[in-house]
Image (cartoon, helix red, strand yellow):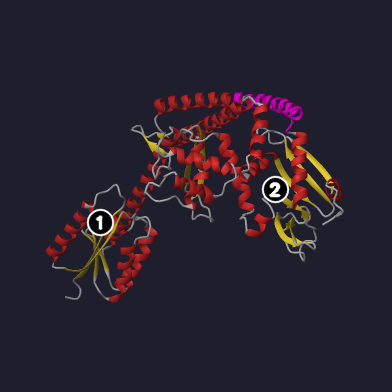
Amino acid sequence: MKGNRVATYARFSSNLQREESIDAQERAMKKYCEDNGYVIVAAYRDEARSATSDNRPQFLQAIADSEKDMFDILLVHKLDRFSRNRYDSAIYRSKLKKNGVRLYSVLERLDDSPESIILEALLEGMSEYYSRNLSREVSKGLLENFYAGKYTGGLTPYGFSVDENMKYIINEEEAPAIRLAFSMYAKGYGYSEILKTLDEKGYRSRKGEPFSKAWLNSALRNEKYHGVYVYRKQNPRKNSFNYGVRTEILRMPNGCPAIVSDELFEKVQHQMKLNSYYYFRESEKTAKGGFPLLRGITFCGECGKRMAINTRTAGRKKEMFSTYRCFMSKHVCCNKEFNKKYLEQYVVMLLEKHLFNKAAMKRAVKNVHQALERQRQQIEQELFGLMTRTDTVSKSIENVSVALNQFGSSEMLLAKMANLEAEKADLENDARTKGVQMAKCQCDIDGDELLLHYMEAKLSGNQYEYRSVIMEYVEAVTVYHNHVVIRLRTGLGLVDDMNMTFELKRSEIYGFFGSRVRSA
């Protein structure tokens, strides 16, 4: 029977197709073998696998088995089941030929004639064109869904559902877990405490399991939770870093309902940024040395690294003593450590003197309102420019549309229309962003409420919450060899570039606490 041994290969490309499709292919191949006196000795099938890629386990297994003299013919229902990529097709055909295996198709009866070679190349080219054109049309449809604020596929984030109009809506059974996670993280709680609280309150994943740290990390970064719809658009342009596909991230403010406020989301992102630089875990030593209020925002001025807590016993009584010390070893950085208690208490004293008292808070609120008004005027001018440009582009689109109706479609006009529509979408997206910024500039500030929030956090006994408040208003503490620079945020979380900077000698801070030690 050598020469008539057949291995069949069947495939369907996506979950949207039914399994009957692959069964129909196998029935047709079985009948083809019966009619031509062939014997099926092996059968391979790939379900929900695309032929534009060779990432098909059963296909690769068939190629590997062709080296073992298991069959003489590899039979497919149609050539596009073998491959829709001309390069891959040529590579694997060459391997089959080298192994003495012929490739046959049920529907395309090709032989070794010159005409068959031309027809085969034409069929492969048409299959590849169909695949790429389908991919382009699908991407275009997904992009239109994004601009319409509709669901574009994939798993919906926890806390959201999709309604009958393919729009995101808040799932009120799941959303409280998201709000609780954001709120706790903003107050300074770590992943373990948040996950423990979620578990105690009975919140579970959609699989009925406790949430993981990986899920929490992803959720806290998900922009959809504060109403920004994010879409990753792939452009097939050459890029050596990601194999020919350039990913463009599009953002649409207010593109989906918000579960948490913008202020809370931004506060969490700032906290995560700090924690990404400096992972902190309270060891037994650190806990005895006191909770580190300035961890993550205290820097070494000599080498630029962050400073960590160093706790040890000192003196005749072997009392616990804590300092902020540079991460780098003494052989790399010559900077001296700084007494933790003195540094933290001095920073708190500066905060309460220059911000957290009635007179200072009143001045800060007035300055912030003036700065927001300047920002509002600038954004208003930018928004007017965007709207003017959008009107111009809209008129150009109308003109191109008239030209298409009069003179018919042409490659130049269609390309012009596509560019104009893309520019209009970008302008509208920028205008929405400016609108959100404008709303932030018009908010009212209650200084008394900020003072009350600070005092409640300080007196609550919750060191995590108190530390989170401190980090809202202290930008950085930089410790140099002979002096310290402390930068306070006086923009009240609304204006980024409003700061107060204090530069003091080490001896000034130590002397303020009556210490005989003038340097560490």
Label for residue 78?
Answer: 1
Between 370 and 241, the one lying in front of the other is 370
Bounds of the magenta span?
Answer: 356-384
Q: Which mark is residue 294?
A: 2
Residue at 16% from the left image edge and 61% from the top image edge: 30
Q: Residue 91 carries which label?
A: none
Residue 164 against residue 99 in the figure, above or below = above
Q: In which quarter of the image is the C terminus?
A: bottom right
Say above or below: 407 vs 32.
Answer: above
Q: Nearer the viewer, residue 388 or 155?
A: 155
Crowdedness of circle 2 by 10 Å Cα count: few (<14), some, many (20+)? many
Tell me where residue 501 appears, x and y as whole percent.
79, 40
Of tags 1 and 2, the one toward the viewer is 2
Q: Is residue 289 shown above or below 407?
A: below
- State the quadrant of the N terminus: bottom left
- Asked whether residue 358 is drawn in magenta, I would say yes
Q: Which residue lies furthest to the front in this view?
A: 317
Secondary structure beneath label 2 = loop
**In this rendering, would 403 be left or right of 72?**
right
Q: x, y (%) of residue 519?
A: 85, 55
* Left or right, 434 with reference to 99: right
For the residues labelled 1 and 2, say whether their Cβ atoms are less than 8 Å apart.
no
Q: Which residue is drawn at 64% across and 38% down?
A: 457
Magenta residue check for 93: no
Q: What residue type is labelled 2?
A: Leu
Question: How far apart are the alpha carbons under marks 1 and 2?
Answer: 68 Å
Residue 171 makes an appearance in the image? no
Q: Earlier in the sequence, mark 1 or mark 2?
A: 1
- Residue 271: x %, y % from top left: 61, 45
From where the camera sits, is residue 123 visible? yes
